[in-house]
Amino acid sequence: MLFANEYEAGQITGMEIGSGTSLDRHAAEAGARALVGLGVNRWAVVHFPEGACACSREGSVLWQPSVKVAAGSIASAVGAGDALAAGVLLGLHEEWPMARALELGTCAAAASLLHATCSEGVLPASECLAFGRAQGFVTLP
């Protein structure tokens, strides 16, 4: 399994994925597929501020938008990618389907944004999911 943000995935694959208004969903998916082609044996997850794209070795592609978090509520983005990875890995460890694990990952990342440290905002899984679902999810471009 590999987790890479849009910049890291771009550096590894040579593809420009972008983020924000420049996010290219086709490039994000192609980047995730390319990472699998480079030897990832289970899932390649490319994440960016707007969400995440996961591609399996078997060719399945899943998308999960980010949680809506008001800009004024964000204390720091440090650790958000790690929180996303931890949430996904916890979900998979619990034998959840990847779609649910990705949702937990994005909810954990959103919760982490609310605190200045890289781990203080991470809540138990059920609380992360409740927070994310209460806030709602962004619409991917």
Image (cartoon, rainbow, N blue to C red):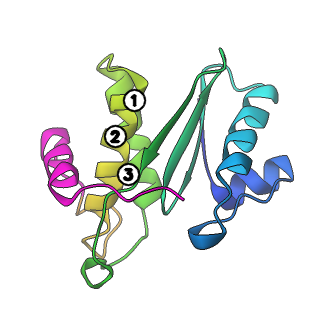
Q: Residue furthest right?
A: 14
Rounded to the nearest whole Å, what is the CA distance between mark 2 and mark 1?
Answer: 6 Å
**Does 90 sit above or below residue 121?**
above
Tags 2 and 1 touching, CB below 8 Å: yes
The reply, left or right, for residue 34 in relation to residue 121 is right
Rounded to the nearest whole Å, what is the CA distance between mark 2 and mark 3?
Answer: 12 Å
Q: Observer-nearest residue: 36 or 86?
A: 36
Residue depicted at 56% across the width and 35% down the height: 54
Mark 2 element type: helix
Image quarter where the N terminus lies is top right
The reply, left or right, for residue 129 in relation to residue 74 is left
Residue depicted at 60% across the width and 72% down the height: 21
Residue denoted by label 1: 99
Residue denoted by label 2: 103
Image coordinates for residue 79, horizontal then vertical, percent: 42, 62
Mark 1 element type: helix
- Which amino acid lies under the numbered mark 1 shown in the image of this protein? Ala
Q: Nearer the viewer, mark 3 or mark 1?
A: 1
Residue denoted by label 3: 83
Which badge, 2 or 3, comes first in the chain's sequence? 3
**Does 32 sit above or below residue 4?**
above
Mark 3 element type: helix
Q: Which residues are magenta?
A: 122-141
